[in-house]
Image (cartoon, helix red, strand yellow):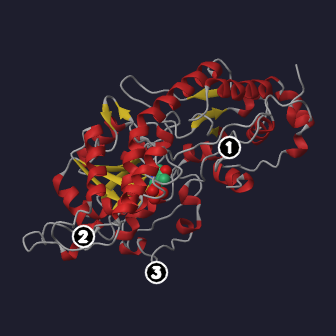
């Protein structure tokens, strides 16, 4: 067997991986049509025909609704603002608590703070990496207004138990499906299993229009409130409506016609992207599932996985090699994939959010300690150990690969699996001879992108 590349041996592969290419003829045509029309946005911030935007914005919303059977769809200029809109529409008020997993993109937790909501973190399940229903229930107080469920990495969260608990306590469920467009949970599309949900259209997501987001809901009042908040609602609100919404004032969270037109073309690609990723993921799972020390994800019948990235739980003790050395040794066997996440494997995903300075110092809105100070009698604390499963995934177990996606093929995936097998077969040797290279740092996907990307 050849020597591991990290010890100077021949790598498994040197031919570069093909770069991801997201924009094609359909997007170019769509964009040109809008440019030719000269109407790059048709929104008007007052009641009337253009309050809900122009032709492309409405066509994009209709297309998304019809594809998945959502009753309402409201496009916005990012999913971060989409989350803010959702909390505003649900009537989050200063001092309301919003439960959220800490293992997610920061906006899942910060969005409610713009309405004075206080983030309360509940742990994740090791098997799904999504909110743990039991810990969610344990964190409920009389002040809990909503829960954010993140379908992390494209795998649906345990919605049935979560929604049952939420219903029992009168808590609204917000689905952050930024990484899970087109995903199903037990036969139902994610996004409207709870009260309101949505998707991101930023460059790094499955489909995109540069920046953008989509809110979905089956609830008429939430949809109307979302439309108001998206587009200066104070100008469009009727006399009889003013009492109906806790947060009727709006902002400008509007998507442009150009982005909507590109979004329509992108939506046409989503099913194809998902089936490619699912096919590659199945192939990789078959290659790795017998390996001791690697735990792979699966989904239950009726559910699907979007594989934003492919997650593996790595047991360093069983494998005989630290996680940081495993990630580096696999990377040494392969060329860097092109694009942003330019390591074939990264570690940890993100640091659990509550360990960041915003929560440690409770400095978010102003110098007076808001939103926490809205409940002056309650001592909110965020400490290491709060969510042990999320911390373990970050510090010890999780590794992620961006290779499981278009335009890669099963032959690319075979090279990746070969690299993993080669490293694990040589684990003892690598541990012995390359230990001086082990800085033990958690090389997250963002670190990897910053270290190597040349885009
Ligand atoms: C990308 C992402 C967001 C934010 O979406 P933007 O469109 O970038 O604002 C929120 N939550 C999760 C889980 C995400 O992955």
Disc 2: which residue: 247
Instruction: Name the N-terminal-most of marks 2 and 3.
Output: 2
Could you tell me how far apart the alpha carbons at marks 2 and 3 are, in whole angstroms?
20 Å
Few, some or many C-alpha atoms within 10 Å of disc 3 (few <14, some 14-19, many ≥20)? few
Viewport quadrant of the N terminus: top right
Q: Position of residue 10 (x, y in %)?
A: 88, 30
Q: Position of residue 4 (x, y in %)?
A: 86, 30
Labelled pair 2, 1 in contact (Cβ < 8 Å): no
Instruction: Name the N-terminal-most of marks 3 and 1.
Output: 1
Q: Nearer the viewer, residue 302 or 21?
A: 21
Q: Nearer the viewer, residue 265 or 287?
A: 265
Disc 3: which residue: 366
Could you tell me how far apart the alpha carbons at marks 3 and 1 are, in whole angstroms?
36 Å
Q: Position of residue 448 (x, y in %)?
A: 70, 50
Q: Mark 3 against mark 1, which lies toward the viewer?
A: 1
The answer to whether residue 65 is visible is yes
Viewport quadrant of the C terminus: bottom right
Give the total number of marks visible in the rendering: 3
Instruction: Name the N-terminal-most of marks 2 and 1.
Output: 2
Secondary structure under tag 1 reads strand
Residue at horizontal 78 percent and vertical 47 percent from the top: 440
Labelled pair 2, 3 in contact (Cβ < 8 Å): no
**Label 1 CB sits under 8 Å from any ligand 1 atom:** no
Disc 1: which residue: 346
Q: Say which quarter of the image contains residue 2.
A: top right
Instruction: Check the image and report above or below for 405 versus 390.
Output: above
Horizontally, residue 105 falls left or right of residue 150, namely right
């Amino acid at each position: 067997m050849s020597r591991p590349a990290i010890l100077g041996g021949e790598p498994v592969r040197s031919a570069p991986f093909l770069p991801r290419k997201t924009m094609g003829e359909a997007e170019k045509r769509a964009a040109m049509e809008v440019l030719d029309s000269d109407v790059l946005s048709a929104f008007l911030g007052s009641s009337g025909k253009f309050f809900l935007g122009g032709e492309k914005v409405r066509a994009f919303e209709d297309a998304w609704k019809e594809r998945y059977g959502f009753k309402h769809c409201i496009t916005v200029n990012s999913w971060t603002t989409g989350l803010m809109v959702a909390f505003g529409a649900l009537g989050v008020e200063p001092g309301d608590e919003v439960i959220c997993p800490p293992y997610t993109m920061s906006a899942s937790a910060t969005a409610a703070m713009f309405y004075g909501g206080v983030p309360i973190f509940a742990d994740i399940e090791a098997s799904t990496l999504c909110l743990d229903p039991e810990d969610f229930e344990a964190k409920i107080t009389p002040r809990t207004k909503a829960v954010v469920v993140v379908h992390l990495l494209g795998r649906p969260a345990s919605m049935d138990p979560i929604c049952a608990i939420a219903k029992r306590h009168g808590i609204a469920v917000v689905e952050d499906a930024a990484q899970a467009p087109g995903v199903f949970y037990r036969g139902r599309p994610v996004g409207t299993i709870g009260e309101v949900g949505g998707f991101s259209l930023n460059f790094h997501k499955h489909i995109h229009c540069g920046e953008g987001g989509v809110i979905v809901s089956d609830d008429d009042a939430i949809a109307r409130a979302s439309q108001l908040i998206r587009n200066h609602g104070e100008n469009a609100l009727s006399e009889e409506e003013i009492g109906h919404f806790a947060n009727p004032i709006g902002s400008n969270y509007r998507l442009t016609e150009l982005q909507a037109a590109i979004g329509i073309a992108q939506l046409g690609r989503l099913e194809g992207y998902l089936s490619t990723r699912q096919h590659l993921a199945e192939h990789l799972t078959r290659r790795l599932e017998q390996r001791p020390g690697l735990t792979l994800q699966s989904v239950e019948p009726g559910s699907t996985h979007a594989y934003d990235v492919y997650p593996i739980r790595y047991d360093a003790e069983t494998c005989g090699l630290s996680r940081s050395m495993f990630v580096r040794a696999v990377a040494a066997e392969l060329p860097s994939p092109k694009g942003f996440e330019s390591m074939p494997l990264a570690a940890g995903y993100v640091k659990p959010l509550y360990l960041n300075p915003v929560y440690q110092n409770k400095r978010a809105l102003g110098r007076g300690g808001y939103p926490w100070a809205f409940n002056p009698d309650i001592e909110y604390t965020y400490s290491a150990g709060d969510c042990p499963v999320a911390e373990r995934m970050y510090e010890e177990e999780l590794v992620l690969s961006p290779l499981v996606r278009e335009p890669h093929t099963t032959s690319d995936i075979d090279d990746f699996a070969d690299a993993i097998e080669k490293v694990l077969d040589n684990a003892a040797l690598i541990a012995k001879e390359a230990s001086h290279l082990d800085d033990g740092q958690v090389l997250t996907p963002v670190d990897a992108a910053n270290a190597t990307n040349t885009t």
